[in-house]
Image (cartoon, rainbow, N blue to C red):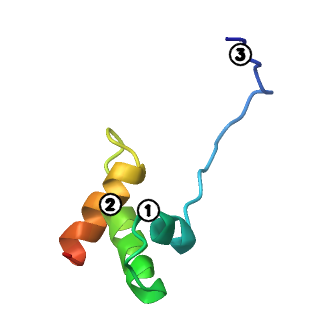
Amino acid sequence: MTIEFAPKKESISIEWDYIDVMDACVRLTGDQAKIVLGAVEKQHDANVGINWEVIQYTANELFPE
């Protein structure tokens, strides 16, 4: 594997949107996905990060099947 280094950065941001949440949890409505996204942001743990598992876990907690 070859790693190409980008120019030095002082900050980065990774963006998730409610469509990503709906892709991870197809049963959610757009409004529910937006609520999940807000909860993920509010409860963000920098040691874990935001990933598909965190999104699915949060969705299941807020909107059980």
Q: Which residue is mark 2?
A: 56
Which residue lies at the image location 32% right of the left edge and 60% below the top edge? 56
- For mark 2, does the 10 Å Cα neighbourhood hold few (<14), some (14 to 19), or many (20 or more) residues? some
Image location (x, y in percent) of residue 42: 34, 66
Q: Is residue 18 left or right of residue 57?
A: right
Label 2 and label 3: CA atoms lie apart by 30 Å
Assign a secondary structure to mark 1. helix
The answer to the question of whether label 1 and label 2 lie on touching residues, with beta carbons closer than 8 A, is yes
Query: Foreground: 38 or 18?
Result: 18
Q: Nearer the viewer, mark 2 or mark 3?
A: 2
- Quadrant into which the N terminus falls: top right
Which residue is rendered at x = 72% and y = 34% of the image?
Answer: 9
Q: CA distance from mark 1 to mark 3?
A: 29 Å
- Quadrant in the picture for residue 48: top left
Q: Report crowding for label 1: few under 14, some 14 to 19, many 20 or more residues within 10 A (C-alpha).
A: some
Depicted 29 relative to depicted 20: above or below: below
Circle 2 SS class? helix
Which of marks 2 and 1 precedes in the sequence?
1
Disc 1: which residue: 24
As helix, strand or loop, the secondary structure at mark 3 comes to loop
Q: Amino acid at mark 3?
A: Ile
Image quadrant occupied by the C terminus:
bottom left
Left or right: 32 as drawn, with respect to 8: left
The residue under the point 43% across, 85% down is: 29
Vertical placement of residue 9 versus 65, above or below: above
Disc number placed over residue 3 in the picture, else none:
3
Q: Nearer the viewer, residue 39 or 21?
A: 21
From the viewer's perspective, is residue 10 above or below residue 37? above
Which residue is pictured at 19% across the width and 69% down the height?
A: 61
Classify residue 25 as left or right of residue 2.
left
